[in-house]
Amino acid sequence: MNNIFDFELPAVDSEHFYTQLKSKNVEIKTIISNTLSTPQTFLQECEEWVVVLQGCAKIKMDDTVYKLKKGDTLFIPKKKEHTLLKTKKTVIWLAVYIYDTKEA
């Protein structure tokens, strides 16, 4: 049994990723972001669904900035560039990555 709230706090302006479950084409991770002020751009080979469990963050996708707070979710399509602009203090995310079955 794991507790997703038991984690080591990363250095300021960085993140830690913890795999909670990995299956054929699904991976679930806890992401801990610590007071990010340097934008981080991602382009992934899978679909991603995130929920904010604690904290606040801003993500830019296309020309839209999403202001996420506790309980908010966001779906990020495969190969969709998105930028984590910043977080307020520590943000705890639960991320579900969905891979094509032929990639798994």
Image (cartoon, grey):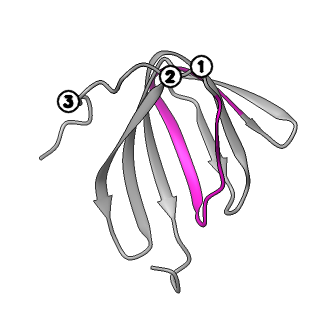
10 Å crowding of disc 3: few (<14), some (14-19), many (20+):
few
Q: Amino acid at mark 1?
A: Ser
Provide the residue designation for mark 2.
70
Image: magenta residue range: 39-59
Provide the residue designation for mark 1.
37
Residue 47 belongs to the span the image colors magenta: yes
Residue closer to the observer: 89 or 67: 89
Residue 55 belongs to the span the image colors magenta: yes
Q: Up-down: is 47 above or below 64?
A: below
Q: Amino acid at mark 3?
A: Asp
**Residue 57 image position (x, y, % from top left):** 59, 23
Q: Amino acid at mark 2?
A: Lys
Residue depth check, mark 1 versus mark 3: number of the one nearer the observer: 1
Residues at circles 3 and 2 in contact by the CB criterion of under 8 Å: no
Count every numbered label the image shows and give the total: 3
Residues at circles 2 and 1 in contact by the CB criterion of under 8 Å: no
Residue depth check, mark 3 versus mark 2: number of the one nearer the observer: 3
**Residue 11 image position (x, y, % from top left):** 36, 23
